[in-house]
């Protein structure tokens, strides 16, 4: 905070020094008899005032331009150049007397230059520099688009994954996925309705992010009824990756050699590795499937089955890991209570 304050104070000091310097130079110009702006000023103090005002206008322009994006400045400059060229071409059709009148020529340049700059800058939101091959040479590596499944939007973890920069690029939302999400949001069941609305909120959050590209496409497969099969066909057509949390869709797509990005697999991979023989401290919540088993959970949600832990329900115990079982739905840890 202190550094930011000191930097701002330095900028203000430089700008004030610039204004005073230009004012002093104007004072000297007038004192030695040099004209200012084509007119001879006789009073040096008026020259100082004119110089300070001119420098102040430059400073105001500079502070305003700092708030403008590089894209708008670039397009505005191109528009200004185009406007000035157009003004010169139009002036060729005027009579010779026009070219001798500096004021009329200046007005014509101002009108066309200003109009060209404003019109070009106002179209910045419609210009995508990423599609200009001269500015962005084509990469030798083809980046796959990511086709988003309904389950990912309802799950919601995609927002945090993108925010952490583990996932980026272009995300495709098919219209049939959006329709399925809207039908879930309009469901009469309260739980399904909440899930659908959360999915729509997640989609809205993705569309607002500047570091990724989200596109809703209207490609459909009328001959295919199921949304999962449509996603598989779309992934084949676009040669993209499927982003999902659906286990069945994951298996179907994998069988057909489609790259699948499963958020559940990512979450499992990020869980700390537990090896047999390690010691854990677990709160036993409930009885397990077997009569003598107790069940607890680690902080990341991993289920821990405690052998002979039924008597420890409602207490925290130290256990030794005996087995780690990886299943399709996640990881299960088995352990026994330390004597």
Image: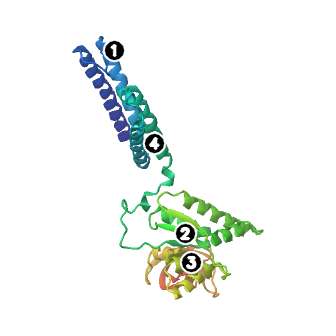
Which label lies toward us, 2 or 4? Answer: 4
Residue 29 in the image, given as x and y percentages of width and height? 24, 19
Q: Mark 4 = which residue?
A: 116
Q: CA distance from mark 2 to mark 4?
A: 36 Å
Q: CA distance from mark 3 to mark 4?
A: 43 Å
Query: Which residue, as the protein is rendered here, is positioned at the far left?
Result: 32
* Mark 3 neighbour class, 10 Å CA radius: few under 14, some 14 to 19, many 20 or more: some
Residue at x 55%, y 82% (from the top left corner): 250
Q: 331 above or below 208?
A: below
The first of marks 2 and 3 along the sequence is 2
Q: Mark 2 = which residue?
A: 172
Q: Mark 1 = which residue?
A: 46
| Near-viewer residue (62 or 246) | 62
Direction from residue 297 to residue 94 in the image, left or right = left
| Near-viewer residue (7 or 11) | 11
Callout 2 touching callout 3 (CB < 8 Å): yes
Q: Secondary structure at mark 3?
A: helix
Query: Which residue, as the protein is rendered here, is positioned at the far top?
Result: 43
The first of marks 3 and 1 along the sequence is 1
* Mark 1 neighbour class, 10 Å CA radius: few under 14, some 14 to 19, many 20 or more: some
* Mark 2 neighbour class, 10 Å CA radius: few under 14, some 14 to 19, many 20 or more: many
Residue 139 in the image, given as x and y percentages of width and height? 36, 69
């Amino acid at each position: 905070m202190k550094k930011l304050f000191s930097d701002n104070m330095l900028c203000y000091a430089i700008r004030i020094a610039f204004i005073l310097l230009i004012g002093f130079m104007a004072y000297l110009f007038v004192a030695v008899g040099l004209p200012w702006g084509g007119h001879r000023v006789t009073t040096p103090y008026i020259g100082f005032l004119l110089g300070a005002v001119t420098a102040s206008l430059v400073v105001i322009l500079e502070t305003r331009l700092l708030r403008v994006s590089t894209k708008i400045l670039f397009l505005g400059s191109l528009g200004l150049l185009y406007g000035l060229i157009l003004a010169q071409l139009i002036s060729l059709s005027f009579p010779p007397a026009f070219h001798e009148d500096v004021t009329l020529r200046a007005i014509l340049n101002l009108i066309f230059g200003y109009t060209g700059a404003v019109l070009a800058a106002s179209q910045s939101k419609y210009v995508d520099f990423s599609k200009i091959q001269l500015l962005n040479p084509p990469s030798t590596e083809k980046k796959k688009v990511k086709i988003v499944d309904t389950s990912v939007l309802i799950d919601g973890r995609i927002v945090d994954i993108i925010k952490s920069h583990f996932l980026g690029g272009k995300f495709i939302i098919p219209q049939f996925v959006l329709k399925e999400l809207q039908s879930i949001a309009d469901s009469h069941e309260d739980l399904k309705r909440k899930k659908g609305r959360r999915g729509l909120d997640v989609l809205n959050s993705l569309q607002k992010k500047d570091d990724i590209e989200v596109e809703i496409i209207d490609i459909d497969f009328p001959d295919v009824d199921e949304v999962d099969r449509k996603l598989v066909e779309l992934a084949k057509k676009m040669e993209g990756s499927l982003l999902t949390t659906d286990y069945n869709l994951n298996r179907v797509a994998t069988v057909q050699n489609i790259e699948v990005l499963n958020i559940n697999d990512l979450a499992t991979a990020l869980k700390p590795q537990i090896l047999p023989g390690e010691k854990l401290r677990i709160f036993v919540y409930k009885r397990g499937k077997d009569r003598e088993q107790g069940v607890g959970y680690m902080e990341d949600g991993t289920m821990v089955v405690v052998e002979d832990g039924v008597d420890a329900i409602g207490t925290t115990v130290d256990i030794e890991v005996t087995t780690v079982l990886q299943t399709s739905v996640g990881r299960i840890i088995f352990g026994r209570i330390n004597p």
